[in-house]
Image (cartoon, helix red, strand yellow):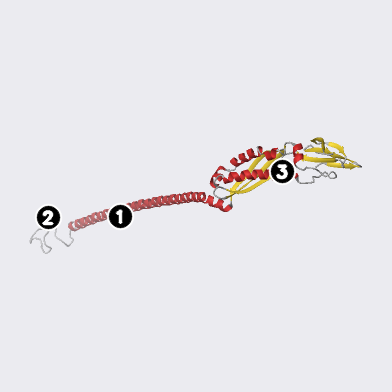
Amino acid sequence: MATIRTIGPVAQLRSEASRHVVRYRNGRLRQSGRGLVFWFRPETASISELPMDDREMTLFVRGRSRDFQAVAVQGTIGWHVVDPERLASRVDFSIDLRTGKLRGEPVERIEARLSGIAGQAVLHHLGASPVRALLDAGPDPLRLILEATLAEAPALAEIGVGPVSVRLTNLAPTSELERALQTPTFEALQQKADEATFARRALGVEKERAIAENELATRTELAQRESLLIAREAENARARAAALAEARGLEAAAEAGRIRLVEGAPPAPGAPGRNRVCPPCAARSASRPRPASASPPTGAPDGWC
């Protein structure tokens, strides 16, 4: 904004370097330039101040695709003044000579023209394709169309304004349509997640089965070894019992032999008792025992049968 200082019948204007000042006196162009400082008479002067820096405006257009689906486009458009004197002659940028403020809203008028041109191009682009094709292509094709449209628009060139940049941040359908379009992809991803979950569970079941089989095989092996151990212990017990029985039998036979030897020994001299047996009778007695009632022959000598 220009700074104006009034001293009596004259005033001084001081503008910034980013502002272009056009001064008219009595309807004729007297001075034009950026960052000017000059004296003027308020009763005969008309001054316009135009911004020379790059400006940005918000673009928001809601349209319909070829298949009658609502689509919203959002972004920004950058613009600047190309010919300030032509713009000052077409759009009112005059300032109040006492305060230095703009009397109207010329920037809003320029942005409204830009918005109308861009909105018409956006609606034409949206209506030429179905919503699926628009979403698949994204905002880049529309951005290129807008840049070409604004650069070639005669309605901007005739007022001395040119585009600087076009940035589109969003090209999206309504929330209901977006959810409907997301459903197949979501279901496919959910199906893959379920398949992964099932595969993980199947793998877990398979591992549990393998572990159970290993445990069963281990228990079977242990049972077989235990049965072999029991059989071996039983065999050892039978062998020990047979050996013990054999040892006892041998001991009993030895005892019986000793008893027979003791019973068959001759009595001591002078001791009463049994008659002595001659060797031939002892041999016969060993091979064929005689009855207990048998008695030695009568008249046999002492010590003989």
Mark found first going from the N terminus, 2 or 1: 1
Q: Which mark is residue 234?
A: 1
Question: Which residue occupies 69% across, 44% down?
Answer: 113
Quarter-of-image position of residue 109: top right
What SS does tag 1 mark?
A: helix
Viewer-nearest residue: 272 or 56: 56
Q: Residue furthest front?
A: 27
The three-letter amino acid code for the residue at tag 2 is Ser
Viewer-nearest residue: 86 or 99: 86
Viewer-nearest residue: 220 or 77: 77
Q: Please name the residue that numbered disc 2 is placed on.
A: 287
Please identify the quadrant where the C terminus is shown. bottom left
The three-letter amino acid code for the residue at tag 1 is Ala
Q: Please name the residue that numbered disc 3 is placed on.
A: 110
Q: Which mark is residue 156?
A: none
Residue 36 image offset from top left, x and y in percent: 82, 36
Residue 193 image offset from top left, x and y in percent: 49, 50
Quarter-of-image position of residue 259: bottom left
Residue 233 image offset from top left, x and y in percent: 32, 53
The three-letter amino acid code for the residue at tag 3 is Ile
Mark found first going from the N terminus, 3 or 1: 3
Q: Is residue 226 above or below residue 272?
A: above
Observer-side mark, 3 or 2, equals: 3
Residue 300 image offset from top left, x and y in percent: 9, 59
Question: Which residue occupies 84% across, 36% down?
Answer: 37
Tell whether 278 sits left or right of 247: left
Mark found first going from the N terminus, 3 or 2: 3
